[in-house]
Image: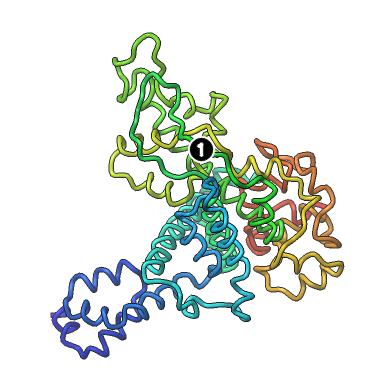
Amino acid sequence: MASASLDGIPVELRMCILLNVPDLETLRSLVHASPAYHQAYVSVKRQVLQGLVQRQLNLVSIGDAITAVRSFNVRAQTPCHTEMVIALLDRRRRAEETQHVTPTFASYDFISLEETIKLLSMQKVARFFLQDFCRNAPCPPWMDSTKWAAEFLPIQLSENETSRFLRAFYRLHIYCNLFGFRENHSEAWFPNRRSLTKPVISSTFEFDEIWDLFFATMPFWEVEEIACLEAYFRIQWTGIFKEVAPYFSRDGPRFGGKLGPGDSPFNCFELVPEDGDYEQCLGNIVCMGPSFLYKVLHQRTYEKRCGLIADNVTLEGFALMDLLDCIYIKDKDFIFPADKYDRDDIRVVLSSLSLLEQPNVAWIRHWYRDGTIDRIVPEGYYDAPFQSNCSDFQSSFGHPRGWPWAYVLWDLETLRFWQAPLLVEK
C-alpha cells in the first residue's frame, strides 16, 4: 500500500522526493522500482544529481573532487598527455580564484551527468575508507594498544577532521591517477618469473616538476595530510599482502605441485616483509590509488582478489614516498593558493584564516615547540629524520614518525582527550 500511495502522489511531489534523496543507492532503488518515479527522474535528472553531489561533498574542495574524476584517464607517463596534466592541475589550483567566491558544485554547469555520477561513486569510496579509518585508526605511540581499542575506537571525527581526511583522500587520488600506476589486466601468470612487472614509460615529469605543479600549491601540513593517508593505505595493503602471500607460495593453491626445480613461486617474494623488495612493492601498489584498493577489497572470492593483486604487483616506477625522500624544499617556492602563507607576518595571516586553513596544534607543537610560528618553513624541516623519534622509515620531508597516527589530522580537543604528550612537552 505504501508503494501504491507513493506512486499515486502528484508528479510535483515525486520530483520533490527525488530532489531530497540522501544517497545514490536510495535514488537508484526508487527509480528502478517505480516507473512513475523513473519518469519524474528523467525530468529533473540534472537537478537531482547536482543536489546529491552538493549534499554529499559539502566538506570537499570542488577543485580537488573534479580533478580526481577528470584525471582518471590522464597519465603523466604518456608524453602526449603532458599538456593535459598541466592544464588539469592548473585549473584545480585556480578553482576558487576563477569563481571569485568559494565555489559550489551547482555553480559548475560544465560538469556532465557522467562526471556527476563519477563524483558520487568516488565519494562512496571516500566514505567507505573514512568509516574504516574511524573504526581502525592506528594507535598513537604514547597509548597502550589495548586501552586504545577498548576506550577510544571507533573515533568520532569532528567536521574539520573529516574535511582534512577527505581533502587528503582526493589529493592522493589525483596524485595516483596522474603520477602513480594503472590497473593491469594482462592475467599473464608465469610461474617461472620471479615477479610480474608492468612496463612503465619514463615519466615526462621530474620530481621537482611534480612538486611545483601539485604539492607547491599546498602548505606543508596539507602535504603531510596526504602522507598520513598514504601511511594509512600502507597499513591496509600490509594486511592484504599477508592474506594473499600463501596463495602464491610453492605449496599454495596457485602452484601446489606444479613448479619445476628451477621455477620460483610467482610474486610471493614481494608479498612478505622479509624480502628486500617488499617496501617498494607496498609503496607502488598504494600508488594505484584508493579506488583500486576498494576494488580489491570488494572482490567476491579469495582467488579473484589474489589474481587482481598478482596482475598489479610491480617493482618498476616510483612511489609517493620516493618523491618525498628526494625533494629538497629549501629551494621551493609556494604557488597560488599556498603563496598566501609565504609572508613575514605569518602569525597575523594564520589568525585570519579558518581552522581548516591553519595547521593543527600537533603540527605546530612538533615544529614550533612553544607554539610561536615565526616563519612558514620550520627550523629543521629539511632534516626531519633527525628531528623525529618514532618511525620505521626515513624521509627528507616532514615528520614521517607522525604519519602512521595521522598527526596532522586531529583537532586540539581530540588530542586533549587522548592526553597527547606533545601538548605539555616543550
> Along the line of sight, which residue is nearer the eye, 163 or 426?
163
> Along the line of sight, which residue is nearer the eye, 164 or 255?
255
Q: Can residue 58 be seen in this view?
A: yes
Which residue position holds label 1? 200
Q: Which residue is drawn at 70% across and 48% down?
A: 208
Q: What element carries label 1?
A: loop
Q: Note whether 44 is above or below 368 in the view shown.
A: below
Image quadrant where residue 327 sits: top right
Label 1 environment density (alpha carbons within 10 Å; few <14, some 14–19, many ≥20):
some
> Along the line of sight, which residue is nearer the eye, 245 or 415?
245
Amino acid type at circle 1 is Val
Q: Which residue is drawn at 31% across and 86% down?
A: 16
Q: Note whether 410 is above or below 292 in the view shown.
A: below
Q: Which residue is drawn at 70% across and 37% down?
A: 394
> Along the line of sight, which residue is nearer the eye, 379 or 323?
323
Q: Note whether 319 is above or below 72 in the view shown.
A: above
